[in-house]
Amino acid sequence: MGISIANAALRLVSGAFILNSGINKLRIDEASAAGLQQMASNGVPQLAELEPSVFGKVVSISEISLGSALLLPLVPSRLAGLGLGAFSAVLLSSYLRTPGMTESDGVRPTADGTALAKDFWLAGIAAALIFARKGAKKVKKDK
C-alpha cells in the first residue's frame, strides 16, 4: 500500500490538529456546545435539532475519529481525504453563512472570521489527498 512523504505530511498536520480539537471538546460545557452548535447550524440547519450536550459529544467523537483516521496509515489517503473533505465542507459552509465572519465580498475573512478561514486549508489538504496521483508504476520490460 505505501504512503508518500507528501501525503504523510498532509495527514500528520491535519490529523493532529483535528484530533487535538476533538480531545479538547470531550468535556465541553453546555453553554460552549450551544454556541458552537448555533454557528454550525448556520451551515447545516438540521444540526439545530440536536440537544447542545449531544451536539458537543457528536462533534468531539467525530473530530477524534477523523483525526485518528488521518493519522493511521492503514486508512487509505483517498478515504481519509474524503472524510476531511466532508468535515471541511461543513466548516466552510458555517463560515460563509455566519454573519460577520466575512467581508462584504462574502469570502475574505473579517477579524472575527480569521480563525475560521483556516478551514480553507483543510479543504485544500482534502483535495490533495483525494486527487493525489499514485506513484509511477514500474513497467516490466520483456527481455
Image (cartoon, grey):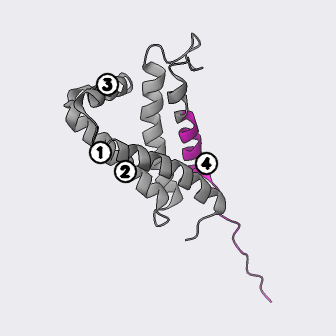
Query: How many residues crowd around disc 1 within 10 Å: few (fewer than 14), some, or many (20 or more)?
Result: some
Give amino acid for label 4: Ala
The quarter of the rendered structure image containing the N terminus is bottom right
Q: Which residue is mark 3?
A: 35
Going from the N terminus, do you reach mark 1 or mark 4 first?
Answer: 1
How many angstroms separate mark 1 from mark 2 (CA)? 9 Å
Element type where label 4 sits in the image: helix
Range covered by the magenta-colored residues: 120-143
Question: Is mark 4 in CB contact (under 8 Å) with mark 2?
Answer: no
The residues tagged by marks 3 and 2 sit, at their Cα atoms, a distance apart of 20 Å
From the image, tell me which residue sits under label 1: 26
Rendered residue at 49%/46% (across/down):
17
Mark 3 or 2, nearer chain start: 3
Q: Residue 22 or 84: which is nearer the viewer?
A: 22
* Lower position in the chain sequence, tag 4 or tag 3: 3
Label 2 neighbourhood size at 10 Å, few (<14), some (14-19), many (20+)?
A: many
Residue closest to the eye, 25 or 39: 25
Upstream in sequence: badge 4 or badge 2:
2
